[in-house]
Amino acid sequence: MNTTEWISRKVSKLQEVITPLLVANAAKRTLEELKAIIDPSVSEVEGGKRAKRVADWYAKAPIEYKRECWLLMSEHFKADPEVAKTAQAKFAAAVGTPEEAVAEVRLRKSTVSPRRRLLQRFSVFPEGIQFLVNMRAEILPSLKSDKRLLALDAEMEYMFSTWFDVGFLELKRISWDSPASLIEKLIKYEAVHDIKSWADVKNRLDSDRRCYGFFHPRMPNEPLIFVEVALLHDIAGSILPLLDESADAEDLNKSTTAIFYSISNTQAGLRGVSFGDSLIKNVVETLKAEFPKLKTFATLSPIPGFKAWLSKNAATILEQLDDKALEKLGKAVGFQPPTAEHFMFALDKVSELDAKSPIAQVLLGCAAHYLGREMRDGDPVDPVARFHLGNGARIERLNWAGDPSAKGLKQSYGLMVNYLYDLKRLDKHRNMLAQGKIPVSGDVEALYI
Amino acid sequence: MNTTEWISRKVSKLQEVITPLLVANAAKRTLEELKAIIDPSVSEVEGGKRAKRVADWYAKAPIEYKRECWLLMSEHFKADPEVAKTAQAKFAAAVGTPEEAVAEVRLRKSTVSPRRRLLQRFSVFPEGIQFLVNMRAEILPSLKSDKRLLALDAEMEYMFSTWFDVGFLELKRISWDSPASLIEKLIKYEAVHDIKSWADVKNRLDSDRRCYGFFHPRMPNEPLIFVEVALLHDIAGSILPLLDESADAEDLNKSTTAIFYSISNTQAGLRGVSFGDSLIKNVVETLKAEFPKLKTFATLSPIPGFKAWLSKNAATILEQLDDKALEKLGKAVGFQPPTAEHFMFALDKVSELDAKSPIAQVLLGCAAHYLGREMRDGDPVDPVARFHLGNGARIERLNWAGDPSAKGLKQSYGLMVNYLYDLKRLDKHRNMLAQGKIPVSGDVEALYI
Amino acid sequence: MNTTEWISRKVSKLQEVITPLLVANAAKRTLEELKAIIDPSVSEVEGGKRAKRVADWYAKAPIEYKRECWLLMSEHFKADPEVAKTAQAKFAAAVGTPEEAVAEVRLRKSTVSPRRRLLQRFSVFPEGIQFLVNMRAEILPSLKSDKRLLALDAEMEYMFSTWFDVGFLELKRISWDSPASLIEKLIKYEAVHDIKSWADVKNRLDSDRRCYGFFHPRMPNEPLIFVEVALLHDIAGSILPLLDESADAEDLNKSTTAIFYSISNTQAGLRGVSFGDSLIKNVVETLKAEFPKLKTFATLSPIPGFKAWLSKNAATILEQLDDKALEKLGKAVGFQPPTAEHFMFALDKVSELDAKSPIAQVLLGCAAHYLGREMRDGDPVDPVARFHLGNGARIERLNWAGDPSAKGLKQSYGLMVNYLYDLKRLDKHRNMLAQGKIPVSGDVEALYI
Amino acid sequence: MNTTEWISRKVSKLQEVITPLLVANAAKRTLEELKAIIDPSVSEVEGGKRAKRVADWYAKAPIEYKRECWLLMSEHFKADPEVAKTAQAKFAAAVGTPEEAVAEVRLRKSTVSPRRRLLQRFSVFPEGIQFLVNMRAEILPSLKSDKRLLALDAEMEYMFSTWFDVGFLELKRISWDSPASLIEKLIKYEAVHDIKSWADVKNRLDSDRRCYGFFHPRMPNEPLIFVEVALLHDIAGSILPLLDESADAEDLNKSTTAIFYSISNTQAGLRGVSFGDSLIKNVVETLKAEFPKLKTFATLSPIPGFKAWLSKNAATILEQLDDKALEKLGKAVGFQPPTAEHFMFALDKVSELDAKSPIAQVLLGCAAHYLGREMRDGDPVDPVARFHLGNGARIERLNWAGDPSAKGLKQSYGLMVNYLYDLKRLDKHRNMLAQGKIPVSGDVEALYI
């Protein structure tokens, strides 16, 4: 070990000792600064300025300092249990008396934590809300390992659900005439079918397409969620023509069908605050106003959980096949009787199969079962199905080779599904779902094994 | 009694019997409709549509029906005390354990009433928030006589304080180039010095004036509060030149002083939600950016409670005069020793008095005492003083004959006061006030009796 | 005569001598400055700056200096006759040869005066075009008395007709949400029915009204011409209900008829540049797009020249009455046979007459004659008739007591007329007019004496 | 020859006969339609509609039909020579009399061709001006071979110079927040340094860059000309760092120098209408307002004509070298005495040379001579030099290897030049140029051979 190594080793050891001290010291200072933000003798404007200073410091702080900051915000600004207890007792006593209303209000106020005031002060300066949303996105991955952060996370989710109430959002069309800086964000945020280039995104904003996003007045250049729509004369069964940059635009005068082929949330920090339902319904109304001839509103959606589910449940499914079907499948895979392994092995070459082939037919049956019958805790097990069925849509059609990309094959053997938004039956479908029955078209029902 | 009279009387009796039945019947239906709004099986979008239908019905309903609607909203949508009790117990038990944070959040959620969800659904449709603000303005006068409405009022105040958080408001300049429909609202809402005509309001929007208001994205054409500012080279002592339509505009290059001469809240329904402090501070920053030469920021304010206060406290004040001062006053009013009655009687002709006269000097002393020393529950007793001193201003100067209008004489014998916003001492002044001491300039202190 | 008087007289004499010298001196300097503007060695940007300096000087100059400036611009910047002559000769020689086109272009260029370049340079700085328009408005009254200004006037008219080409104008709706500063201009410029107050103008911008103006990109806050329209269910016969501020707004769903009841040019300096035809046709298209139920487009117009014309032509008209009609009229005026003087005297009390009375019937006949038959140089003699008939409208209906205001009585004994814009017959009507025949409805034709 | 071939040959022969007939027939109809546009009995609005119909027809017409249309517009709508002659005679006679002004105006009017009215009518409909600009761009290549089109071309140039007068143009900043559809046009139109990708254009719109364009109100989405500027702390000598997408943005607080590194005209149809001078001067003013620390404004420009010029003039230049210099050059190229051929041959490997090498020094001397001394008809011979020197700039610095791209090597052996815009000396420099002397810095002068 030469001198340099020796020094370097010493420094490293020193750092091990010093870093926690530094962090602890910084934490102490940060706590003071956080408390100063909600100092009751200070005006909202001044509180906002102090919050801004903390945010500026945070932006450059190393991750250890940030973690400390989260913990401080979560643990040092909680509601006072004693106050809550007293208020609860008073409320209980007041029930049925003329003071009940006032007692109820006092109880609610008593449970409001200083943490909420802290978050509110961060909302005062212009970029404050974006700051908090970004901070929550940073915190989320640590939630499982550190329960102490749950209180801060819940408080944020609550405040965000108030601030980002759908009534405050603005639906805006995004087109090729939108700012390049905004379109660049579509490229970045697109979560379903990756945008490969500017030519790709231009195709998706062509004259026969529509793209809409929700925007918040405090984050004017940031779409919170956006949806891509194709205007067609029929329900689309494959994503390929929609992503084909060289395809001609459809004639809008003949469009009868709006296909929602991609919906992307953009802000991880807004987890738990949902806009999708409102977005789709607002877009449907906007489209109907612009194109009165539109009659059908449906999605062309991936089935993200299908392959993973099938790999665990193939055996159970095959048991349900009758002898004839089993024999047919056996012929196709080359083994009698065919096992789940044989079936899964044959699916490795799914892209070579025809939709009418026995293996394909069994696979479609599995997918119909997965989407139309598999539920967990009262909800459809597939996440995309959960979203659209929860909005009142129904499962309309399964599409063979709908997405033959590597991603499509990996998720669902290339299968895609259409969810139909039948505007007159949304509530009826929601009720069915609430009673544990997934609404499914006759065509899909016919695929059940 | 002829036949017509007889019929009319019968009808009237019948109405007495029928009206309550009708109202009760309508109430039943209204309750169902309100409950349908927050039906959990219904999407937010659909809930918003239902709320819109109730709002449309309400707009045309007679007052009896409206009252019933308020009561329903206040009494039928309260939080469940049992749920709150259980949550409280769980929280108390969790204190100090790793589950504390989650328990805290659950407690808070348990105290949230269905009433809040009801209000939120009204916020979904575009005019919904304005609807709620207007409804609260209608309810406010009934609050004292009907305690049952307190819960609804408190819930509204809470929701409004969230929705109208200063961070969400937009500061906009209102000028002669603003829409006529907006300027018409200034005329309607101006609360301090009535706007008599379009020529009057044009003068207040002249090149040497500024007018700013806070706007909410959901009520874009409605100023929530606005302030009128004159740019001068000295602190104004009289409102007359500021309201003189024929006066020439000041030379902006010489302006060193911004005088806030009128601040008006416009929405009675937003009682308890305060913007004034933020408005003034934002306007100060905006003005400093546009006119770097501005050094002094002050108000020219009325003293609305002075005369009423003096009529009750004159005797006590006069007792504090020393013999010499008393004799001087006696000479002036023509009685030795002068009583409170003599003094008040002499004040009937206050508009004929000179600022240097003995009566005027005593009156100024009384006003200094009223503003600078009279407090109730730790707050200055005059409402305008309460507002500005609460923001960190100090009492700078009393102005004889500052507002010789009928209103000015009636409120404060024509006296006006300047509150100074010394930006570097706002917090210091707030602290003084918190310790029970009203910050006052040397000039005003010298007036104390 | 005391000393003061003596001095004052001397000064006055001195001024008489000095003023022309000063003016002459200033003129010399101004000429140099004007020449410097079009100095060919100077860039357009620099030329524009020099023009701006002259405009700033002009704004404050006394009228004598301004007059000199006009003369200089008119007389010192004319085209070179020699150059024009040569170019003309070359063009004549080139006719029929391949060089004809080029020669034609050169001829045109040779006739372009330096004056035009001067005007163009004034158009470079932002307010330059407004400056020139205002200057021409100042010059117009002097044109008759000073022919030397004609060249400048003609040059301006030519440039303005290019700059204010209708293709460059923007049609904008003016509503109660328009800037107060713009609405104030409506009050100022309204030329047909004076706007008496802000309440009056608000009524004219009510929900059942429309107001449109043409705007030029270089004068964005200045309407060049505007028209006021009422949406009704029938052709209006009187201006009174349209100007009644307390009248309820019409139900727009029932509107079938758009009445243009006021058209005002605002810029005297744009004399000779016409927008009215385009304005009306653009407004008709805009209204049809917004209200597909509109079927009838007509004016309610004054007859400004009628009374003056009648006072000269009454005798001639009466001669055309048959005996029966003459006797009837005689009875009504109380003289047999009635002379023009009797008739005119009776008309002094026109506001007391009923539309069916013999005097009224003769008066209506005279008006029909005046509008439908009187032409000068191939054009209708009444200026408003000239405008609408020139646009292709026809005379539809005469209205008794259509405008009983003092102005209405003074112009046309209170009569008003409707011009109908029948969109399918505009060209047909223009052709009729070109052949010397004024298009008139059957109803009006029936009134002819 | 089989039957198919035989038929095909017949059809082809038939087409040869029929096509001219078809074109002639179409021409006849087109002429009628063109005449109908300026039918004096038709309103401007109606004329505009007719022009629109011709434009719609033209958009789809084959090239032969378009050519006919051009000829018709050029030859059938010329001014009447007889009228011009008479007006000229009257003007000549009126010179010196009071009627001179009016006669001058009449003469000018007499030379205005119906062709101009035709063009004006095309300007009435919204896309009309763009239509004419595009049509002229189509005509331009045919001008040399068909003189008959010159009249139409000249008329268009005249009208365009009026419509596109700089006073009517709007200077707009183009940034990464501009519409993608606009930025796409930058990519398309960039004429100096090709934009290779969206990453390339994003770099050119980075925080230390500015891009400005002139826009016309009638072509709002089309930049007429645009300039790209880099904000630096020194005059740039190489284009490479400016086009380096991975380079960090400069610190704007330290910027003292604005470098104009690309100026592109976009509309071929606007040939002869110049905006560049105004653009640069407007941009300079805009930049100075935003960045008061900017002191130096210069270009980094290509020398497009240098290599072509040198290949013709190398021998002449070498003659001017003194013996010592010639010997030095001879050593470098390996021949004594070196001929032009030797020199040019050595330049094939210019990219391997150092700026200090003898060959480089001679080359720089040649470039200095080319830019600073070569004139034709009183103008600098290099087109870019002509533009900037004409605006009043001076030649500031020659940069070795300023643009080592293939294009840069091909145009000018990689040399680039800075033109300096010294705002206080623009007029002085323009005057020098007018006197035949190109303004050049001392550094460049020192390079002269």
Image (tube, coloured by chain):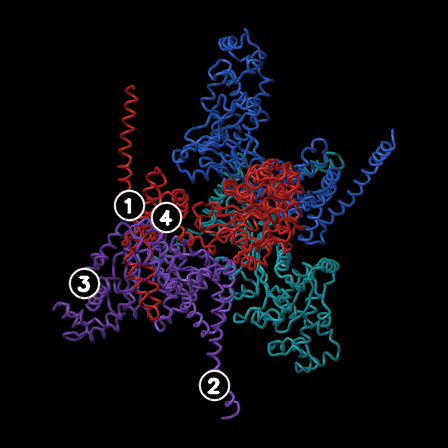
Chain colours: A red, B purple, C cyan, D blue
For the point 49% across and 13% down, which residue is it?
D358
Which residue is identified by label 2? B13
- The residue type indicated by label 4 comes to Leu
How far, Cα to Cα, is label 2 from label 1? 71 Å
Letter of the chain that mark 1 sits on in the rendering: A
Q: Label 4, label 2: how many angstroms apart (C-alpha)?
A: 64 Å
Residue C54 showing in the rendered view:
yes
Q: Which residue is mark 4?
A: A150
**Residue behind mark 3:** B448
Q: Are marks 3 and 2 in contact (CB under 8 Å)?
A: no
Q: Secondary structure at mark 4?
A: helix
Disc 3 crowd, CA 10 A, few/some/many (<14, 14-19, 20+): some
Any mark on residue A31, and which?
Answer: 1
Please determine whether, in this image, residue B354 is positioned above or below residue D416.
below
Task: Please name the amino acid that badge 1 sits on.
Answer: Leu
Task: Identify the amino acid type marked 2.
Answer: Lys
| Residue pictured at 58% horizontal, 18% vertical | D310
Nearer mark to the viewer, of 3 and 4: 4
**Labels 1, 3: front one:** 1
Q: Residues within 10 Å of mark 2 (few under 14, many from 20)?
A: few
Q: Can you say whether B395 is above or below C337 in the image?
A: above
Residue C118 appears in the figure: no
Q: Are marks 3 and 2 on the same chain?
A: yes
Q: At label 3, which amino acid type do we have?
A: Tyr
Residue A240 locus on image (x, y percent): 62, 40
